[in-house]
Image (cartoon, rainbow, N blue to C red):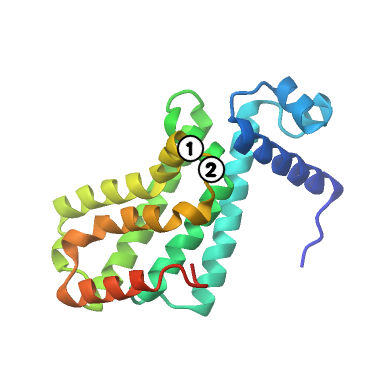
């Protein structure tokens, strides 16, 4: 296990405090306001993150590191072959998104304002598209989804719908339900994401999806 340097620990401390600030009161703060709010000197912050954009990128990268750990750990203990494994997998991703909810929302609803953020999102879109297609191919192979989903025109519509819903649910949460806890809303938002799959479910898929949803609220979620 690698030991973090003093500088790396300071960066993590800054990001943690800034993330807490953003979640409490939004991202619309100057570096000076951030400094005052988190109780750190401005020069200490700008030594590592010269601009607010750098803080946003830093938080997005930290989110992705934690996401990679979650995915690796989950897949090492549970191979996703059907909806019984897929639902808790998605719920775990949503919980992590909730932890970084304000900075994710900011990056989604401010296109063109932060060029490096936009570039970052585009790279992730291409990566996610490939990963999701592979997951859908597994579900089709296992008789849970119809092959029609992978037809080029159909898949292009599906992937846009799925990525919009699975990404932008956090924006809607911040706009409409920011005073609520994750546990109080997770089932409803997860059902909304899963609804993108409903038109393509086979009979077996419908039965398994219904049964998997019936298990929601247990320890796995």
**Mark 2, secondary structure of its residue:** helix
Q: Residue at x 30, y 51 (%)?
A: 162
The disc at residue 174 is 1
Using the image, determine if residue 188 lies above or below residue 10. below
Mark with earlier residue (1, 2)? 2
Residue 83: give x, y in percent of width and height.
34, 72
Residue 178: give x, y in percent of width and height.
51, 39
Q: Using the numbered discs, state the Cα–Cα distance from disc 1 to disc 2 in whole angstroms.
A: 8 Å
Q: Residue at x 71, y 44 (%)?
A: 16
Left or right side of 23 for 216: left
Check the picture and name the quadrant holding the N terminus.
bottom right
Q: Nearer the viewer, residue 133 or 19?
A: 19
Q: Nearer the viewer, residue 180 or 108?
A: 180
Residue under numbered circle 2:
101
Left or right side of 203 for 93: right
Q: Are marks 1 and 2 in contact (CB under 8 Å)?
A: yes
Place residue 171 in its image quadrant: top left
Residue 73: give x, y in percent of width and height.
57, 71
Left or right side of 171 for 140: left
């Amino acid at each position: 296990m690698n030991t973090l340097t003093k500088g790396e620990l300071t960066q993590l401390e800054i990001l943690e405090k800034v993330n807490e600030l953003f979640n409490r009161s939004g991202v619309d703060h100057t570096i000076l306001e951030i400094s005052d709010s988190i109780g750190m000197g401005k020069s200490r912050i700008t030594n590592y993150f010269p601009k607010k954009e750098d803080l946003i990128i830093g938080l997005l990268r930290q989110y992705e590191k934690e996401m990679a750990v979650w995915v690796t750990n989950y897949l090492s203990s549970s191979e996703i072959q059907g909806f019984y494994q897929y639902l808790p997998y998605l719920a775990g991703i949503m919980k992590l998104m909730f932890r970084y909810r304000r900075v994710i929302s900011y990056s989604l609803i401010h296109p063109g304002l932060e060029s490096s953020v936009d570039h970052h999102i585009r790279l992730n879109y291409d990566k996610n598209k490939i990963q999701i297609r592979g997951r859908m191919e597994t579900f089709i192979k296992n008789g849970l989804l119809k092959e029609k989903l992978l037809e080029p025109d159909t898949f292009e519509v599906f992937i846009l719908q799925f990525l919009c819903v699975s990404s932008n649910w956090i924006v809607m949460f911040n706009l409409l339900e920011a005073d609520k806890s994750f546990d109080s809303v997770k089932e409803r938002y997860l059902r909304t994401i899963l609804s993108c799959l409903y038109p393509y479910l086979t009979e077996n898929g419908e039965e398994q999806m219904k049964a998997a949803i019936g298990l929601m609220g247990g320890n796995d979620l």
